[in-house]
Image (spheres, rainbow, N blue to C red):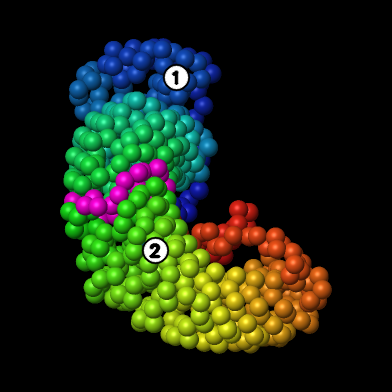
């Protein structure tokens, strides 16, 4: 559930160039008339409009005496004129309630234009579908039906008067700082199709009345501070195609609430505290394409039907309490391209039938209790870009030479997998490689000079092995390196060639207190100092769904984070 935010052609494009209108210095007679009319028709409470400095007070003052359009008070609340007046008042109230003076773009709010023109055309960011899109309020036949204002620094709470914009079909106000509970005023919007509230500061539970919004196809509540169990009424929202509940504090089970949502294509419930197993939950979701239930407390086994789905492209189950063997009878699956099972309790061997998922680009089985050999059939997964097998109890052995088949590979981790013998020179052919993690194995012999021929390499972790010899001069060509860990090996000579290349790694660790010379190392170790390098493995092995499952951040321990987009 993601609405792109791009730079507008016009910054702060208020028609008058002012951006906002301050309340007039003196009250005029019309203010009392407007206030009486709004109160008599039940639009706003008297106390709210009377409170000095309140958003309601500012909105009344503005529409009474500062609005250039100067709409007359309608004779009838139920008339076209009445609806137009109320809509304009509510739009102004949104401006003052959500700190409009601090928005990144003013979008013609509080100008003399009709509220249907309180918007601006933006140029879409690269890669976003559609070249142009409209931000602000938009109308159909003179009635506001779209409130699309993502990522413009809205702050505050949504007033209950939002219920008077009951014809809204699209609400996209994600990526702001909006507070409070989910407004009950949304309940009246029976035509609502798209509701994106993610990446805000909403609190409380998901209200039971949410199930009344039965025409909603996209619902994004992720990245807020919501809690409690999911309401049973969620199962009534059978038109849902995309549901994002990720990164909140939801608890309980997900089974009964989700089973009726058979039209779902994208489901994100990661980063909560759900406790359940996956049996039969997704059996009827025959159109599901993306499923992320990672970082919960789910238990049990991985259902075979998820691994053999004819529609599922992304399956992320990492950081749960799933266990048992990974199903070994996976049949042909040309659809799945992203599989993340790391940080669970899986046992047994890596099934060779994973190779039947021949379009996989991302495979992460790290940090489990997997044993046995690395299956040779994995060599058939030639589309892989990310391969993580680290931190398992695999049978000791060399790095497989077929790793050279993966010419698109960007990230590779055999960390703590009992790799022995020399580093496979075939790794030097992986010209797209950005991360190579061979930390804490039993690798021996000299470093192959071919590693210095990887122009995109940014993170090279070779610490805690039994490597010997000098560091090849070719390493001086690795000008993109940000992290280089050579510590706890038996290297000799100098690595100062790297120090003089012009771009020094931000983290550079070596045994430079006795074994090698290094004038630019950020940390110098000795072999007997076991706690010299206690940095964790790459923590952020899997990107979050907001980033379209593309690696954008690398995290080493709790303090070092690198933005992969730079």
Kindly indicate the quadrant of the structure image that contains residue 136: top left
Kindly indicate the quadrant of the structure image that contains residue 423: bottom right
In the image, taking residue 281 as reference, residue 340 lies left or right, namely right
Query: Could one spot residue 384 in this view of the protein?
Result: yes
Percent of width and height locating residue 350: 38, 71
Percent of width and height locating residue 354: 32, 73
Residue toward you, 499 or 95:
499
Residue at numbered disc 2: 347
Residue toward you, 427 or 551:
427
Percent of width and height locating residue 476: 70, 81
Q: Residue placed at 24% from the left, 39% from the top?
A: 234
In the image, taking residue 173 as reference, residue 519 lies left or right, namely right
Is residue 269 within the magenta segment? yes
Residue toward you, 484 or 463:
463
Q: Residue placed at 73% from the left, 84% from the top?
A: 470
Taking 29 as reference, is 168 above or below it? below
The segment highlighted magenta reads 262-281
Residue at numbered disc 1: 57
Q: CA distance from mark 2 to mark 1?
A: 64 Å
Q: 10 Å neighbourhood of mark 2: few (<14), some, or many (≥20)?
A: some
Q: Which mark is residue 35?
A: none
Query: Could one spot residue 194 in this view of the protein?
Result: no
């Amino acid at each position: 559930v993601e609405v792109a935010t791009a730079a507008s052609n016009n910054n702060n494009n208020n028609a008058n160039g002012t951006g906002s209108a301050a309340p007039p210095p003196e009250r005029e007679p019309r203010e009392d008339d407007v206030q009486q009319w709004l109160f008599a028709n039940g639009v706003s409470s008297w106390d709210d409009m009377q409170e000095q400095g309140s958003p309601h007070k500012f909105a009344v003052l503005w529409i009474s005496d500062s609005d250039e359009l100067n709409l007359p008070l309608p004779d009838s609340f139920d008339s076209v004129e009445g609806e137009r007046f109320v809509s304009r008042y509510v739009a102004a109230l949104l401006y003052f309630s959500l700190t409009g003076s601090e928005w990144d773009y003013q979008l013609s709010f509080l100008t003399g234009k009709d509220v249907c023109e309180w918007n601006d055309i933006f140029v879409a960011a690269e890669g976003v579908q559609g070249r142009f899109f409209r931000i602000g309020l938009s109308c159909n036949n003179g009635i506001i039906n779209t409130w699309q204002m993502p990522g413009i620094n809205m702050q505050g709470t949504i007033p209950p008067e939002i219920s008077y914009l009951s014809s809204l079909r699209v609400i996209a106000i994600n990526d702001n700082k909006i507070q409070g509970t989910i407004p009950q005023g949304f309940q009246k919007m029976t035509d609502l199709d798209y509701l994106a509230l993610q990446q805000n500061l909403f609190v409380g539970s998901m209200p039971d009345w949410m199930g009344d919004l039965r025409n909603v196809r996209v619902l994004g509540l992720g990245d807020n501070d919501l809690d409690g169990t999911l309401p049973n009424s969620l199962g009534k929202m059978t038109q849902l195609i995309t549901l994002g509940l990720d990164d909140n504090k939801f608890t309980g089970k997900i089974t009964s609430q989700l089973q009726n949502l058979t039209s779902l294509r994208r489901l994100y419930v990661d980063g909560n505290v759900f406790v359940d197993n996956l049996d039969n939950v997704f059996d009827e979701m025959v159109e599901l394409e993306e499923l992320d239930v990672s970082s919960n407390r789910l238990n049990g086994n991985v259902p075979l039907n998820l691994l053999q789905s004819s529609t599922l492209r992304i399956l992320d189950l990492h950081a749960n309490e799933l266990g048992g063997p990974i199903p070994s009878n996976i049949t042909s699956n040309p659809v799945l391209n992203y599989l993340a099972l790391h940080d669970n309790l899986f046992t047994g061997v890596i099934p060779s039938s994973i190779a039947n998922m021949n379009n996989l680009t991302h495979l992460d089985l790290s940090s489990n209790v997997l044993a046995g050999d690395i299956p040779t059939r994995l060599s058939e997964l030639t589309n892989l870009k990310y391969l993580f097998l680290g931190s398992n109890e695999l049978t000791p052995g060399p790095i497989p030479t077929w790793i050279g088949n993966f010419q698109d590979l960007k990230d590779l981790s055999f960390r703590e997998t009992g790799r022995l013998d020399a580093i496979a020179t075939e790794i030097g052919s992986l010209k797209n490689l950005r991360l190579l993690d061979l930390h804490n194995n039993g690798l021996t012999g000299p470093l192959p000079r071919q590693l210095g021929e990887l122009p995109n390499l940014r993170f090279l972790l070779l610490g805690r092995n039994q490597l010997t010899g000098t560091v090849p001069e070719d390493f001086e060509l690795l000008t993109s390196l940000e992290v280089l860990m050579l510590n706890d090996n038996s290297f000799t000579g100098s690595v100062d060639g790297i120090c003089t290349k012009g771009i020094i790694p931000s983290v550079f660790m070596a045994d430079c207190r006795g074994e090698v010379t290094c004038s630019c190392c950020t940390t110098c170790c000795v072999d007997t100092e076991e706690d010299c390098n206690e940095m964790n493995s790459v923590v952020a092995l899997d990107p979050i769904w907001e980033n379209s499952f593309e690696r954008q951040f690398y995290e080493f321990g709790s303090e070092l984070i690198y933005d992969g987009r730079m």
